[in-house]
Each structure stands twice: as structure tokens, then as C-alpha cells.
Amino acid sequence: MTSKRAKISILMCFISFGGFSACTTTKPAFPKKYAQPKSSKTPSRKGQTISKQGEKVSKPVAPQVKNSHEALFSSLLVLDQRITDDELGEMSRINTPPAPRSFAEAILTLGNLKFVQRSAADSVASSQATDEANSASSAPKLLTIQEQFNRTDINLFDSLKENPYLQSLQVFQIVQATLAVSGDSERYREGVAEVLGSRIAMWQAFADQFQQTVPKEDGEDSLRQVASPVDPSQYRAADLLLGDTILLQAQKLAEKGQFKSAVGRASRVTSVDPFYPAAQEKIKYFSNLAVQELRQKAAQAFQSSLPVVDIKTKAAYLVEAKKYLEEALSDFPAADHLTTVRENLAVITRDLESIDQDVSPR
């Protein structure tokens, strides 16, 4: 048990600086005083007709926009900020269970964590007041994260692993702070720590995949070297001059970072040219260098999206990363590692689609 606790402590320390399925329950998600009051005056979603000076006037209802809770989401992301009654009331109007990977699921996840923190603070304060009155000490009864998430039909583990809005160290710091004050069992804490550790490892592995180096060709240390494919004595000087000139031009373009143009120039060497095998090698080599550079740019954009909490800014970084990966696939089909590029592109595209479903107006 000591080693497990140490493991959790190390993981939480890392988060500071940078599964178990939830069962269902019929308990209300939040105390009744925060729930939306039922009243006949509450307008329906379709609008209602009201009478005004003998005329029937259709009372418009504001259209539902998926990003209407962005202010609430931003507020919940503030690490040391206590959740308010108004925020709890707004959360109580979100239908449960929310759709997996949705903006609503992200809001309720953060709200649940903040509510556990608030409940713990209130319990400690109440216990201290009681102890002072009774001249005795007693441990306060703390709400557990597991119990709170059961009430809203959300699986915290799946939410932390799959929801694109929760993929940031800031969110994980909130989880850490909540674990520190909740009354959860050691086993549940270990489960949460395992999820956080796996996500951090995935981020690192994902970034590392982008930045894999392309191995140099055997016997070739720079772009300036040109491999000689065959014995030049077998061909006429004019034939050798044509292929050799094209490859030299391609190399100069590559040295300037113009890899697409370099590949296009090397592709001009025809199959009957004695330098054709060398041209094919150069096309692959230039393509690998280009894809390596594009993957590094995509990695920078992807890593920049991780700490960002603003939804539109996060999406912009992911779009930038997606653009670089699509360019690698379309412009350099002869490169190696394209399977990995496709896998990375699929992950980014999936997250962008999830974000777009919630950010774009209906």
C-alpha cells in the first residue's frame, strides 16, 4: 500500500508542475436548493403565445447555442475559485446523462469536482464549529468524488480519457486538488491516478511520434552528396549531364527548404535516364526531410493546444496541426512514416469534430 501511495504522490507532483466504472443512482446531482424551480411561468423551448392589449403576440425564445455555457466552463477552470450557487443552478439545468465527449459532459465533470471541493470546505468548517461548541473533536464526513459522479451518471475515468475539452494539465490539477479533500477510498484514488498517468504518457508519446528523426541514407551525411547509381562510362556524356544537372538543381532547392519543389524537380528524371535510380532515392530522401519538418510543426501546434482552455483557440491550434499533416500526406507520398502521420491525423480530426459539434452554431 505504501508503494501505491508513493506512486500517486509522484504523479500528482508531476501534474502540479506542468478503470473503475461508476454505478448509477437516483439521487439528485446537487442539493434541491440549486435545482431549477418548476413554475408555470417558465417559457417552453418552442416559445409561447401571450396576450398584449387584446392582441396575440408570439413570445420568442432565445435559440439554444451549444457554446452558451462557455462563461461557466471558463469559470470552472479557475483552479482556486469556489463554485457559486448561480453556477450550480446553471449546471442543474443541463440534462443528464450528458453525451460522451460533449461540452456538457466537460462542464458537469468540472462542476462535480468543484462541488466536492466546496462540500469538503463546508464540512470542515461545520465540524470545527461543532467541535468548538462541544469542546470535542471529530472527523468531518466528506463527500466522495465517486458518489458525486454517480449522481450525474458520468464515468469520470472515461471523461478524463476521451473528452477533448478536458485534455489539459489545468484540468488534471483540479482533479488533484479534489482528490486531496475528498473522502474517496484508496482504491478509487489509485484508479484516478492511473488514468491521469496514462493520459500524460499518451501526450508525451504522441508528441514524440511527431518528432521522430528520419535516418540518413547509408554513406550520406548531407544534401550536398549525390549518389552515383551506375558506372558513368556506360552512358554518353550528354545523358549523364541531363540527369546530373536536374539532381543538382533539386538539391539546391532542398537546401533552401523548398522540399516540394525539390521533389518536383527530381521527378523530371525519366526512367530511361541513367540517374533515374538516384533520382528516386533523392525523391524519398527529400520527402522524408519534408515530412519530418511538417511533423515537427504539427507537434508544436498540438503541444500548444494542450494547456489552452479557450475552446476556439484550442481548435485553431488543432486545425494548424491538421493542415501540416494533410500537407505531408498530399505532397510527399514517397515518404516513410506516413502510417504514423495518418494515425496522428485521425486523432486530431476526431477531436476537432467533437469540438466543432459544440462550438459551431446550429
Image: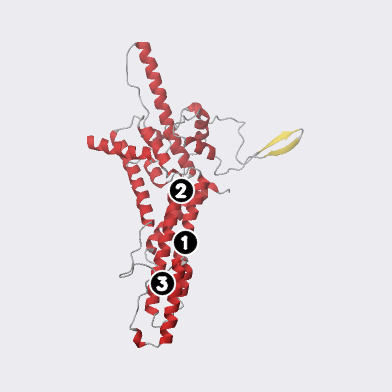
- Is residue 272 visible in the rendered image? The answer is no
Label 3 close to label 2 by CB (< 8 Å): no
Task: Tell which of 58 and 175 is nearer to you.
Answer: 175
Instruction: Return the x and y of residue 310 as percentages of the image width and height.
Output: 50, 43
Picture quarter containing residue 210? bottom left
* Residue at 35% across, 42% down: 196
> Residue 326: which disc?
1
Residue 187 versus residue 220: which sits nearer the camera? 220
Residue 283, numbered label:
3
Q: Position of residue 83 (x, y in %)?
A: 47, 30
Among numbered discs 3 and 1, the one appearing first in the sequence:
3
What secondary structure is found at the residue carrying circle 3? helix
* Coloration of the structure image: secondary structure
In the image, which disc is placed on residue 305? 2
Q: Nearer the viewer, mark 3 or mark 2?
A: 3
Quadrant in the picture for the N terminus: top left
Above or below 141: residue 163: below
Query: At numbered mark 2, what does the secondary structure look like: helix, strand or loop?
Result: helix
Q: Residue at x 26, y 36 (%)?
A: 6
Residue type highlighted by circle 3: Ile
Pick the residue in front: 88 or 48: 88
Gap between marks 3 and 1, in whole Å? Answer: 19 Å
Q: Residue at x 52, y 49 (%)?
A: 357
Marks 2/1: CA distance?
A: 18 Å
Tell which circle, 2 or 1, labels the residue nearer the N-terminal end: 2
Question: With respect to residue 22, does 257 lie above or below?
Answer: below
Q: Residue at x 39, y 70 (%)?
A: 224
Amino acid, disc 1: Glu
Can see residue 183?
yes
